[in-house]
Image: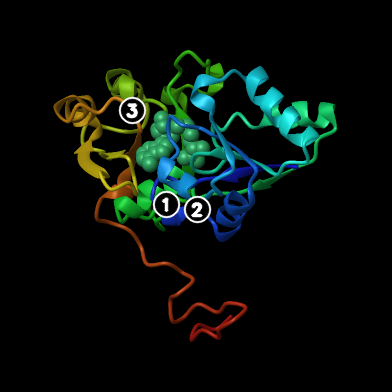
Amino acid sequence: MVHFVGAGPGATDLITVRGAKLLQQADTVIYAGSLVNPELLQLCRSECRVYDSARLTLEEVLQIMADAEKQGHLTVRLHTGDPSVYGAIREQMDALDQMGIAYSVTPGVSSFCGAAAAAKAEYTLPGVSQTVILTRMEGRTPVPERERLKELASHGASMAIFLSAGMLDAVQAELLKGAYTDTTPAAIVYKATWPDERVLRCTVGTLAETGRRHSIRKTALVLVGDFLSGGYERSRLYAPEFTTAFRKGTEQE
Ligand code: SAH
């Protein structure tokens, strides 16, 4: 059986308990070496076969899975963060379906959660934004026209931009075509939860310049939105007057 496992954003203790157990049991591990923290592989047994998928094509990955399955191996396919976000797991799952190989998915802590933790921020502040947009700039992978950054930026919602740290000039220009202004708060979070994590606070107007000054080109998320600044309203859920399923408030219903 093949287990797709989210490795978490970087820190080795941010993999789930289930994910760690699967790594400990694995006979074969295929890990996304470009981003997964290699220290996680220390959980594997010494006889476990380990492959770095950064050097492999989809076909080669599938061949390793098929060979492992023939030997009755437990295979872990280790993806960075959560596998459902830019993980390219659908094409692997569809191929496994065709080959009749069973699989499961174990979620992980996505880097957009790791980045919020690093910045000590909350994406969904009452009176500021109740929406988080996870997206990317168009690169070699196309983005549908209606999802172009400038279109999404028209909402002024909280945003986490993946896979775009090498295109910060374009990111900045697109964001400014939407509801954000030069002074909208932004942050570049480099290697969230890794030992060399950096949180570079800036504004949309200084985004590209900040990236240049700190030589950020990859392994970073761009966070944008007023959630990174001061003002917000108190949550209704914890307001004394607010009645919930678990607590009677002081307000007449
Ligand atoms: N599945 C992953 C995303 C893979 S796409 C997840 O859930 O996080 C790879 C992109 O994720 C990188 O280009 C970068 O934008 C972001 N990323 C991954 N790990 C990161 C980290 N520790 N800190 C900041 N950004 C990270």
Q: Nearer the viewer, residue 61 or 174?
A: 61
Q: Which mark is on residue 15?
A: 2
Task: Kindly indicate the quadrant of the structure image that contains residue 182.
Answer: top left
Please give the name of the residue rendered at 67% of the width and 27% of the height, measured from the top-left corner: 64
| Spatial CA span between label 1 and label 2 | 6 Å
* Viewer-nearest residue: 17 or 25: 25
> In the rendered image, is residue 94 in sight?
no
The residue at which mark 1 appears reads as 12
Residue that extends furthest to the top in the rendered view of this protein: 140
| Local SS, label 2 | loop
Q: Is mark 3 within 8 Å of ligand 1?
A: yes
| Cα distance between the residues tagged 1 and 3 | 20 Å
Q: Quadrant of ligand 1?
A: top left
Q: Residue at left 17%, top 31%?
A: 214
Mark 2 belongs to which amino acid? Ile
178 w.r.t. 249: above or below: above
Give the residue pinned by disc 3. 218
Disc 1 residue crowd, few under 14, some 14–19, many 20+, Cα 10 Å: many
Q: Quadrant of the N terminus?
A: top right
Q: Quadrant of residue 18?
A: bottom right
Q: Is residue 158 left or right of residue 229?
A: right
Percent across and percent down for residue 110 are: 48, 45
Counting from the top left corner in percent of width and height, residue 116 is at 36, 50
Seen at 50% across and 52% down, the residue is 43
